[in-house]
Every structure is written in structure tokens, then in C-alpha cells.
Amino acid sequence: MTNFSIDPSIRVSFRPCTRFVRSIMELLLLCTPCVILLLSSLYLLRLFVDARRNLPPGPRPQPLIGNILDLGSQPHRSLARLAGRYGPLMTLRLPPGPSALWRALRRVCAAELFAPRSLDAHQRLRRDKVRQLVSHVARLARDGAAVDVGRAAFTASLNLLSSTIFSADLADFGDARAESSVGDLRDLISEFTIVVGVPNVSDFFPAVAPLDPQRLRRRVARVFERLQAVFDGHIERRLRDRAAGEPPKNDFLDALLDYRSPEDGRGFDRPTLQFLFTDLFSAGSDTSAVTVEWAMAQLLQNPPAMAKAREELARVIGSKQEIEESDISQLKYLEAVVKETLRLHPPAPFLLPHQAETTTQVGGYTVPKGTRVLVNVWAIGRDSKVWSDPDKFMPERFLQSEVDLRGRDFELIPFGSGRRICPGLPLAVRMVHLMLASLLHRFEWRLLPEVEKNGVDMAEKFGMILELATPLRAVAIPV
């Protein structure tokens, strides 16, 4: 054991430090009430000013953190409950939300990816991807294995997008390693949509942002880095091919690389392309897959609706093996099933935030310029003032109705409306109907025994995209 000795003179050196700490503590004790008084005064002044500005009513914001605690883990449900108390137009104080795509990117997407001529040109490609989906389900049926409906639909949607954008599939239904990579990619996209949808405390307290108290920045960075590696590989290969004089593929990636802004002649840089591809693949593949999964879950829980959908397919399609997109307009009950699914389970429970360009009056209240407007489409779809039996899955409600989902009827706007409507709506509508119709036409479906006994778990996993918390697995029987 080593003996230690302390020089007594050291004690003297501590005294100034002790006095300094004591002085700081006394100063803090004196200042704390002043700080609390100042913050409380500012808070009360803010409430008074808000009352004088005739803002819509809403829950009282807490000092510093606003209404973030009112959101809970299921904000679409929390805000629907608050609307029952304060009315359909509410004021909330929340941190800044995610942007909409840049105008230039939106313009290119609308012109090159989602334009009618582009969609018509890719009709054969969509048919091929759905054919691969049906073949995959048929293989599982022969083996007596259950189908992970969401994952299968995601793979088809993923390959459709990747073939349209990169002229290459990102997955192969028949490859076990590819199946694993598909699961990883879907998990990545799911993680991305969940993390981005979580309210971030750092937005209220910029001073603590570098500490990342909720670890959200780290999670987003980790997910984005892995997605970026996938996209960068395709960009690099294309740039090498173009440099080597390879003929163009005339796909969306070529269109993006050739784009030059009419304002300054500049093209898109690499980070912009990475963010765009992240948006496209999360919004384009996962939303379509989630809609098909929700529709199948509802049909499996409602055998009469399932029987009606399959009877219509047998009557309209007959013995024809493959469904053409031109057949969809004749499948009125199937269209009603999709509308009812999107009413109850919009892929995105909130539309992308809008912003008031000028101060305006809505419902007798003032909406100041610059206000971010958040539309709860999940709550609109379950409003008992608009829908009878709003929580019941009842496709029949749309059979005698002219309500459409393309933004003209505000009671059903899962894709938004007006100039900010989702540019991918035409592709999503075609792909969802084609996948769902093909799965119902070629197979009978049964729940697994344990699921049939306990019922399908319809709990939601909240994020920018509203998913089933428990993936739907069912048994397909070829017909």
C-alpha cells in the first residue's frame, strides 16, 4: 500500500475557489426567480397577444416546449381527440416540420416520372412486376408457406421504382439473399419514415441540438448513410457508363443527370439526388405496399367484402390469367375497396405541411402569414359528421357515391389536393389497384390459425407512413 501525504498549504489554495463557487451559487439563487419571472411574463404576454390576434382555439402551450406534449405517441389520434374539444381548426405551437420537395425537383418528377405519357410507356413494366409478385406468391402457396403480404407488395413496388429510375431491380423474389436485402431495405425505409415523424425537442431548444438528446439525428444519419450507399452505387455506375460512351438508358436517372435549370443552367448535385431518391423510394414503394397490406387485412377480417371483390373479378376478368390496367375501370367494387382502405388508413396520416402565404380569415379566425398548416387526413376520414359508421370497413358506401380520391372531394384527400397534391398519385393508383386485383383474382386467402382465432392485429405503427404494427401474414391458395 502506498502512503499519500497532503501539503497543508494546499488548503489555502482551495479557499478562493470555494469563495468563487459560493458567489456563483448565490448569484444563481438571486437570478433564478428573475429568470422564472421573465419567462412567465413572456409566456403570459404571448397568450395575451395570441388572444388579441383572434387565432383559432387550441390547447394551452407550455412555456418553452409549446404543445409537443399534447401529441403523444399517436399524434393523428391525439389531434383528432383535441379537435373534438376545440373544433376542426386549432392553433398549436410545434417545431418546424419537414419541407416539401423543391419546385425544380417536383417539376422534373411531374414531367419525367409521373406524366401520363411516361406512365403509359411503363405499362408493360408494371405488368412484369405484378407478374413476378404473383409468381412469388404461387411458389409460397405450393410450399405451404405463409405470405408476408406487405413485404411481397413492397418488393414489387420497389422493383418497379428502381427499374423506372435506374433501369435495374433492387431485389429478386427468387433469391434468398435478395429476400434478406429487401427486408433490410424495407426496414431502413420504415425506420426513416418513423424517425422523421417524431417531434424533435432540439427544434425547441437549439442550444441542446448538438447533444441530440433523443438520438434522432444519429438514427437518421445512420439510416440515410445506408440508403445513400445503395443510391450512390447506381449513380456512380451510370456516370462511368456515360463517360465511356455507353448509349443512354433514357430512364429517370438520365433525365436527372441531364437536367439544367432554366434560371441558372445548373444541374442537381449529389446530395440533392440522394434526398430525392430517399423521398421517392420511401413515398413511392412503402406507401403503395402499406395500402395493399391494409386492404388485405380489412378484407380478411370481412369475408363478405372479400367474397364480393372476388366475385366481381371472376365476372369481369373471367378465365383470363392476367389483369390489364384497362380492366380496372370496370372493377367498381375493387375501386370502392381501395377508397375505403385509404379513408380508414391513409398512408400518410398528415399531409405535408403547407404555409399561409398571406394573413387570411378561416371560419371566423385569423390565420397569420407564415403559419404552417397541418391537415389531419386520418381524422377527416373518421369524422362522424361526414361518414356514417366511420370506423366500419364498408366499401359499399362508395358504390353510389361520386366521391373521388384525386383531390376534388375534401372528405377523401389521402394524396392532398390542389397544387401541392402528391405528384405520385397517378402511379400509386395504378399500382395499388393492379397488385390488389391480381392477388385476389389468382388466389383465395386464409388467415393463419392463430390469427384467425385472435383476429388480425390492426394496431398502427406511427411515422410519416402509417403501417401495421404487426406485419400481415396469410396463406394463399391458387385458383
Image (cartoon, helix red, strand yellow):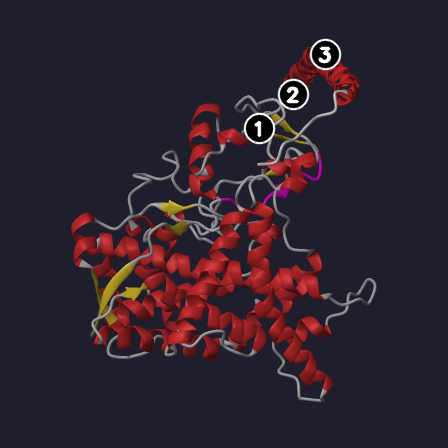
Q: Residues within 10 Å of mark 2 (few under 14, many from 20)?
A: some
Indicate which disc, 2 or 3, sits on the residue closer to the N terminus: 3
| Residue 304 location, quadrant | bottom left
Q: Is residue 7 left or right of residue 44?
A: right
Q: Are marks 2 and 1 in contact (CB under 8 Å)?
A: yes
Is disc 2 in contact with disc 3, using a CB cutoff of under 8 Å?
no
Disc 1 secondary structure class: loop
Residue underneath mark 1 = 91
- Residue at x-position 61% and y-position 36%: 2
Kind of residue at disc 3: Glu
In the displayed structure, 474 sits above or below 179; it is above
Pick the front one: 122 or 290: 290
Q: Does residue 214 appear anywhere in the picture?
A: yes
Question: Within 10 Å of the Cα at label 1, are there few (<14), some (14-19), or many (20+) other Cα atoms?
Answer: some
| Foreground pick, 453 / 119 | 453
Q: Amino acid at mark 1?
A: Thr
Q: Which residue is mark 2?
A: 50
What residue span does the magenta drawing correspond to?
A: 350-358
Question: Could you say where residue 357 lies in the image, as x and y percent from the top left?
Answer: 70, 40
